[in-house]
Amino acid sequence: MDGSSMWRGKTVLITGHTGFKGSWLSLWLTRLGAEVIGFSDGMPTSPAMHRLCGLEAEIRWLRSDVRDGGQVLAAMRESKPDIVFHLAAQPLVRASYADPAGTFAVNLMGTVNVLEAARRAGTARAVVLATSDKCYVNREWVHGYRESDQLGGRDPYSASKACAELAAEAYRLSYFGAGGGPAVATVRAGNVIGGGDYAPDRIVPDIVRAVSEGRAPVLRRPDAVRPWQHVLDPLAGYLRLAERLYADGGVYAEAWNFGPDSGRTLTVRELAERLCARLGAPSGPVIIADGGADAGPHEASVLKLDSSKARARLGWRPVWRPSEMLEKTAAWYESWLEGASMKDVSMRQIADYEQALRSLREGGES
């Protein structure tokens, strides 16, 4: 981020504000002095970080479904946001195989509805649309994908996110150029982890559930490589990008990767073993062999992002190394299991991140 003062008094609409990323972003923006208004159709999980942190009592909630274009437009007109973060999504690869039509309805048409509402309401100056690192045609490359690489997807989730990217580009070229309408950017983050994620079929909440129940976690694809990063790393990028879009949108209205440095990728096995050891799991993870009948439908084996553009043009870079990322994640869940105030715990972690970011910049790294 370039500075917290920009956010004071700004009205920010977050779709999907009750989700994992949305809850962290809501907390951070309230800390920065913004008026946050949320849009979602309910709590995505039980428990849910949004509720654990008491955000229902603090954030105005426009409760509706992003698939309903009329309701999205009504919310945009009612809230009159300065800045929009579109995070609402069906976020799971395996769930997309079970419900492909629903996945496309949320991830593609939900994005179109947000773009159309921003176009017609006319108050937002900046719109940040979250897609996915899986929006690229996956060629199992050992190097990271760049923003100029081909879009596509073998599974419904990945394809729906590639489609959302194409829709955003069409709106940029057709309606939002030459100063007309908001500055729109898409963001493609790596696999985020952190406290507060309770989704099914995701490695960290699966491990936490297993450890709390005294059983060994199960890994579907232990040797798969993912761009793991703490959730605050890409959110810091989203905030910095939104600041630039708001101030000088035409220069930054494009696609952006936010992923870990190349030397910070971990396999599923490595992440699981380190987190299990930190949480005191009774035994190591149960391994399901790649390609076995229990491994489920196809998922990519290697996925990395090249975030050099964000580093060069936004001055963004990941802050927390894998050891810090895992420590903060484990500490959050331990605090939850102990009955601590999760808003206080989360705000302290945001403050710790801000301090680490300041130290990184003072050390001469941007």
Image (cartoon, grey):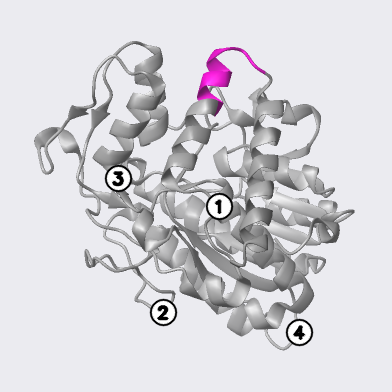
The residue that disc 2 covers is 148
**Relative horizontal placement of residue 117, taking residue 334 as reference (left or right):** right
Disc 4 marks which residue?
179
Q: Nearer the viewer, mark 1 or mark 3?
A: 1
Which mark's residue is nearer the viewer, 3 or 2?
A: 2
Amino acid of disc 1: Asp
Q: Is residue 10 placed above or below 333 in the rendered structure?
A: below
Q: Nearer the viewer, mark 2 or mark 1?
A: 1
Determine which of the numbered discs, if any, sits on residue 233 in the image: 1
Q: Quadrant of residue 288?
A: top left
List x then y, in percent, for residue 225.
27, 51
Q: Distance between the residues labelled 3 and 2?
A: 27 Å
Mark carried by residue 97: 3
Query: Which of marks 1 and 2 precedes in the sequence?
Result: 2
- CA gap between label 1 and label 4 equals 30 Å
**On screen, 263 above or below 18?**
below
From this viewpoint, which residue is outermost toward the right? 9
* Membership of 337 in magenta stretch: yes
Given residues 339 and 41, the one toward you in this image is: 339
Q: Magenta: predominant secondary structure element?
A: helix
Q: Which amino acid does label 2 sit on?
A: Ser
Q: Looking at the rendering, which quadrant does residue 61 occupy?
A: top right
What amino acid is at disc 4?
Gly
Query: In screen coordinates, is 119 left or right of 97?
Result: right
**Left or right for 13, reference 51:** right
For the point 22% across and 53% down, which residue is it? 301
Q: Nearer the viewer, mark 4 or mark 2?
A: 2
Q: What stretch is highlighted in magenta?
A: 332-340
Does dot 2 land on a helix, a strand or a loop? loop
